[in-house]
Amino acid sequence: MAEDIYSIPWENMSIPNQKTLMMMLARAQPSLEFISAGGLRAGVRPTISIIKSTFTYYVMLKTSIKVDK
């Protein structure tokens, strides 16, 4: 469906119609998923959350190692 929407001659449309068409195109795109070991599927938001948590723990450990020296 996204290909059909993209093939519409949008450059000849009014600005409000172009914006509507862009919104339709964004909603027609397939969702992005990451597949990890064992076939575990995760969306973008959970993956970002995991990366943020991992970085937070890394910084915490790095800081605690510097304090102990």
Image (tube, rainbow, N blue to C red):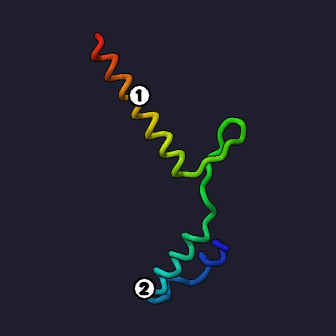
Q: Residue at x 34, y 16 (%)?
A: 65
Q: Residue at x 56, y 84 (%)?
A: 9
- Left or right, 55 with respect to 24, comes to left
How far apart marks 1 and 2 lie (CA) works out to 47 Å
Tell me residue 26's x, y (percent).
54, 70
Q: Residue at x 53, y 80 (%)?
A: 21
Q: Residue furthest top?
A: 69
Secondary structure beneath disc 1? helix
Q: Which quarter of the figure is the C terminus placed in?
A: top left
Question: Which residue type carries mark 2?
Answer: Ile
Residue 59 found in image quarter: top left
Question: Which label sits on residue 8?
Answer: none
Question: Which residue type carries mark 1?
Answer: Tyr
Secondary structure beneath disc 2? helix
Residue 67 found in image quarter: top left
Circle 2 sits on which residue? 15
Tell me residue 47's x, y (percent).
53, 45
Q: Residue at x 65, y 39 (%)?
A: 36
Q: Which quarter of the figure is the N terminus placed in?
A: bottom right
- Left or right, 56 with respect to 66, comes to right
Q: Residues within 10 Å of mark 2 (few under 14, many from 20)?
A: few
Q: Earlier in the sequence, mark 1 or mark 2?
A: 2
Tell me residue 25's x, y (percent).
56, 73
- Left or right, 2 with respect to 39, comes to left
Residue 32 found in image quarter: bottom right
Q: Residues within 10 Å of mark 1 (few under 14, many from 20)?
A: few
Circle 1 sits on which residue? 58
